[in-house]
Image: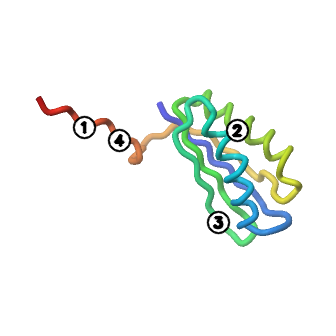
Amino acid sequence: MRCTRVALYDITTGTFDEVVSEAKSGMVPLFKDSNGFVSYGVAQIEKDAFVSISTWETREQADAAAAKAADWVKANSRNRFTLRDNYVGDLAIDTGHREPAPTAM
């Protein structure tokens, strides 16, 4: 079953646009090169807060992504943002996942 990781971050210095730029150059390649990667997104939810949402093929891969993300944030955030909460859960509904269409014979 696919799994989603949702992480809530607080911006401590700088802007959301700066965080997005850092995520594009750092977190995106890190996740894309990870086993089980399906998708990743970042959304501003408050003036000084954002959420990171990633989807993985398994819970183990989502948990591994949480550890990779924590290491990346510690090494690269330059104290611009900090993790407030992290959640990992099985997807009950995944409308973004499309099964291949049957082949006509």
Front disc: 4 or 2? 4
Which image quadrant for residue 69? top right
Q: Residue at x 69, y 69 (%)?
A: 46
Q: How many marks?
A: 4
Which residue is under mark 3? 45
Q: How packed is label 1: few (under 14 Cα within 10 Å), some, or many (20 or more)?
A: few
Front disc: 4 or 3? 4
**Distance from the alpha carbon under mark 4 to that under mark 3:** 28 Å
At numbered mark 1, what does the secondary structure look like: helix, strand or loop? Answer: loop
Residue 30: percent from left, percent from top: 68, 39
At numbered mark 2, what does the secondary structure look like: helix, strand or loop? Answer: helix
Q: Which residue is outermost to the left?
A: 105
Q: Where 89 falls versus 13 (above or below)?
A: above
Q: Residue at x 35, y 41 (%)?
A: 98
Which image quadrant for residue 50? bottom right
Identity of the amino acid at label 2? Ala
Identity of the amino acid at label 3? Ile
Tell me whether the residue at label 4 lies in contact with that at label 3, contact meaning CB atoms closer than 8 angstroms. Answer: no
Which residue is under mark 1? 101
Residue 34: percent from left, percent from top: 63, 32
**Distance from the alpha carbon under mark 3 to that under mark 2:** 20 Å
Circle number at residue 98: 4
In this rendering, position of residue 73 left or right of residue 29: right
Residue toward you, 57 or 23: 23
Q: Residue at x 83, y 52 (%)?
A: 77
Which residue is under mark 2? 66
